[in-house]
């Protein structure tokens, strides 16, 4: 039995319902660390911690799965250390599912890195050369023990020429086969990544090549790289329907509420973004009526919660006036409370979208939501 | 019925047991927001928040009472705002007892403040003159709604001449009478403060004058101002036994575990200090074997909890290796976990001291504790 067959004992995706009026779908992913209803939004815990958040807040706020970064953990504290600690779940005390990226996105963003068929060579904090390529990325991700591992690929910058894109995707596909060869842990699931920049026929070519490998899941990469909402929509609405119906579809690095509703409408099941946690630390809160910046003087005497109907710890227990005071006084608690609210709000958005899909009213839900959200 | 008699319906101290071999005492304070077993250590929440800590962690870690700072809250967000929010307990969502200081300590530490019989005049962030004196301090504290209010006094710097001290304590006593006149809320309890610098006969004079007012409780002020452990011990061991047995005794701004054990041995019931929370944010953890600095390379592969027998959230769920990683990666979660552990550790120290007092073995407890703590 090969690794893909072995893996099926540990991982599955079930398409539960397709919305009658759009491509949107509701499903369930089963991983060794729990079930994930989809669509799902994944908060980011770069260094093995959601920034400013004790992990005890995750389960009570219905967080289903988190993302952590291979590049950062590879450098500090190192995958061997985390393996010795019993894997990333135990190390960070998060019992639920974890997806790790491949490190490719970070490595290719570095200045001074050099790129070969082997992978990318870059300098660590001490000036030592480090190679990150397909074999190393999978080795590290297997030591971390994530539920979902991402293949090592090049996230093509925007804009890119057709020639650059053709060369890049050819190499990404050679790398994918090397990732597959390196994959030995059947409890972990390897996802392939579909690149192709803005060239829809190259997206099609990538789907054909990548999805022929019958991997546990697939991602659309190389979006949310500065191409804007309309171009992202063009790529995702073209590519997602080409992907296998019986496998989860993940769009990497998305995004804003508008982008999320768009990718869900086009049949995407998973996504991740640093927006809710990063904005939280700056005092920006997501609400159904749009973003609010809590430092604004309007909130000085506002004794309502951030979002009156929200059931998160922050909204159940604190007023806008108090949270504004915390940010004004530079208290860390402000960032903590904002993070709790924002990740809850994004998870609630995904949960509401799922309900709407199950009831064939996703298009209406999206329209009503955006009307209230953007009306502010 | 005057305010002091009215207050007795809302506040009481019961001396439960005096240790047979020392002055140490176990007691219970009853406030409108709950009972406080003594001796007790109060963590500091300067701006109406324990730094880096969601208040939901306080009760589960047996925190009995917290201190908040009148000076800081007076400036931002202002006592009127907090009163409008329903008082400090509701504003910060802490249902337990709160003690507020008078603001005197902060005001007298400011450069450029001027001092008159009225009080102290200083400039706020906008350059506007602000007066803080006895009437204003009590007015602010009454708007905050703290369970225990401290009288506005001068915390005499160390060293101070006898003449300076005599003049200062005379004014502090005039101010105390003005504080008493301003006190109108019987649910809140006004504590008087005994100054006198290092002059034991002046400490006696202050006890005579201040305690003649029959206030709900008394503090020893003007220690922990750079005089060192031995001189602090001389002052506290002389002064505490002069104070009424049927009222709580509070030493302000103490301190280290060594200082705490010393003041408890001399019959003090309450104290506060920023040490556990401030050190936590720098990566210093208190353990029964002394302080550890988690950034040290020794902890890189240390998969034990900070304190193996500790029942705090941090020690139950995370290893030293993970916490070191959080500090190395500059993750806010490191400060959160350290704060939880340190305030729990200080509270546990007080709880263990109380148990020892109730069993007449405080002296032995102190000796054994310090032997392990300092042996490292």
Image (tube, coloured by chain):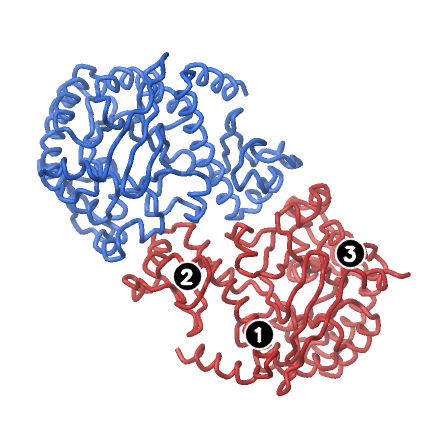
Chain colours: A blue, B red
- First in residue order: circle 1 vs circle 2: 1
A12, above or below A206, in the image: below
Categorize mark 2 by other alpha carbons within 10 Å: few (<14), some (14-19), many (20+).
many
Q: Report the front residue among B169 and A171.
A: A171
- The residue tagged 1 is B260
Residue B181 in picture, x, y percent from top left: 86, 59
Asked where in the image residue A20 lies, by quadrant, the reply is top left
Q: Distance between the residues labelled 1 and 3?
A: 29 Å
Residue B86 horizontal side relative to residue A365, left or right: right
- The residue tagged 3 is B187
| Disc on res. B44 | none
Residue in view at x 43 percent, y 31 percent:
A346
Residue in view at x 42 percent, y 43 percent:
A59
Categorize mark 1 by other alpha carbons within 10 Å: few (<14), some (14-19), many (20+).
many
Q: In which quarter of the image is the N terminus of chain B?
A: bottom right
- First in residue order: circle 1 vs circle 3: 3
Residue A157 in picture, x, y percent from top left: 24, 27
């Amino acid at each position: 039995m090969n690794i893909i067959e072995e893996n099926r004992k540990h991982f599955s995706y079930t398409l539960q319902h397709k919305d009658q009026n759009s491509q949107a779908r509701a499903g369930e992913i089963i991983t060794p660390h729990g079930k994930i209803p989809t669509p799902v939004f994944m908060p980011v815990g770069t260094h093995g911690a959601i920034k400013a958040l004790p992990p005890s807040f995750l389960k009570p706020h219905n967080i289903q799965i988190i993302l952590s970064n291979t590049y950062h953990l590879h450098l500090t504290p190192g995958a061997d250390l985390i393996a010795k600690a019993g894997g990333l779940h135990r190390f960070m005390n998060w019992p639920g599912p974890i997806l790790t990226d491949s490190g490719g996105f970070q490595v290719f963003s570095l200045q001074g890195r050099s790129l070969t068929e082997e992978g990318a060579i870059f300098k660590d904090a001490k000036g030592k050369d480090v190679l990150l390529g397909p074999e190393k990325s999978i080795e590290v991700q297997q030591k971390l023990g994530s539920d979902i591992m991402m293949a090592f690929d090049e996230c093509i910058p925007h804009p890119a020429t057709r020639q650059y894109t053709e060369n890049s995707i050819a190499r990404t596909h050679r790398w994918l086969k090397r990732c597959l060869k390196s994959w030995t842990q059947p409890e972990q699931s390897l996802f392939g990544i579909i690149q192709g920049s803005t060239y829809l026929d190259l997206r099609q070519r990538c789907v054909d090549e990548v999805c022929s490998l019958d991997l546990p899941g697939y991602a659309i990469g190389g979006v949310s790289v500065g191409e804007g909402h309309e171009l992202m929509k063009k790529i995702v609405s073209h590519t997602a329907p080409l992907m296998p119906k019986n496998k989860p579809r993940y769009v990497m690095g998305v995004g804003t509420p508008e982008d999320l509703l768009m990718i869900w409408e086009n049949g995407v099941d998973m996504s991740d973004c640093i927006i809710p946690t990063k904005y939280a630390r700056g005092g920006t809160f997501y609400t159904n009526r749009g973003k609010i910046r809590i430092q604004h003087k309007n909130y000085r005497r506002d004794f309502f919660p951030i979002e009156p109907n929200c059931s998160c710890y922050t909204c159940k227990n604190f007023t806008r006036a108090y949270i504004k005071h915390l940010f004004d006084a530079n208290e860390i608690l402000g960032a903590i409370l904002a993070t709790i609210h924002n990740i809850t709000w994004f998870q609630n958005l995904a949960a509401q979208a799922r309900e709407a899909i199950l009831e064939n009213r996703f298009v209406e839900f999206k329209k009503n939501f955006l009307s209230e959200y953007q009306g502010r």
